[in-house]
Image (spheres, rainbow, N blue to C red):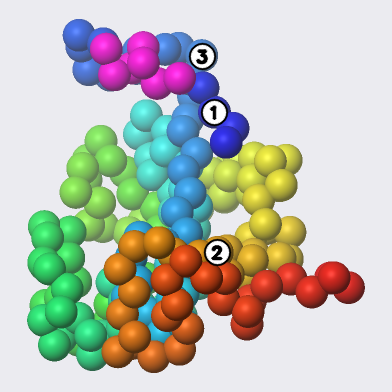
Amino acid sequence: MIGRSLMKVLAAKHNGPIDPARQCVVLGQERGSHVRYDNLGYPMRAIRTHRYLYIMNLKPDRWPLGDPAYVLRGRMKSSDTKVPLEALPPDARKRPTEQLFDVSRDPACLQNLAQDAAFKEVRDDLRDRLTETLTRQGDPRLHRYGDIWESYPRFGVMRPELGGFAERGKYNPKYQLRPDE
């Protein structure tokens, strides 16, 4: 893992910028739970500056909360972040490829500014900074072998009722790299 300690920020006694050298934080997620067919994740990468949060949803064709039928059958527990999405029809639950939020004005991140012409320069700058960082770090999702993340074993709860690969502690053979790749 590449990074620097956040202890200075976590131990701070005041709000706002703590470490002037820290201009942003880069974040990544592959999956949180087994809630999709074949144990697929919901990969996202993000960059957070003092004012903005830019999110790149790398598989926007997937539902962030998981299979809608599974969610609607009440199998997933609700949380504050899921409740607004659960109220939407299934097709409206998908997220766009890019999201941009002004967290100083919209701390709940409800207004996506990514397609707002007034924020084009901010969006493009954050996209470029994120892409450059991830490329330099060798992120598999940006180097055309990102599906390797779909292979890794899951040791938590598996839900065979979702269908597809659901063998706890096993690699998904459908997504493993072959020697010629």
Q: Is residue 152 magenta?
A: no
- Can you say which quadrant of the picture contains the C terminus? bottom right
Residue 21's disc is: 3
Work out whether mark 1 precedes mark 3 in sequence or the reverse, and give the earlier one. Answer: 1
To which residue does mark 1 refer?
3
From where the camera sits, is residue 55 visible? yes
- Binning the other alpha carbons within 10 Å of mark 1 as few (below 14), some (14 to 19) or many (20 upward) gives few
Give above or below for 70 relative to 51.
below
Q: Residue at x 57, y 71 (%)?
A: 171
Disc 1 element: loop
Query: Residue 9: x and y, percent?
Result: 33, 17
Q: Quadrant of residue 87?
A: bottom left
Disc 3 element: loop
From where the camera sits, is residue 90 visible? no
Residue at the far top: name it: 13
- Can you say which quadrant of the picture contains the N terminus? top right
Give above or below for 112 relative to 181.
above
Magenta segment boundaries in residue numbering = 5-11
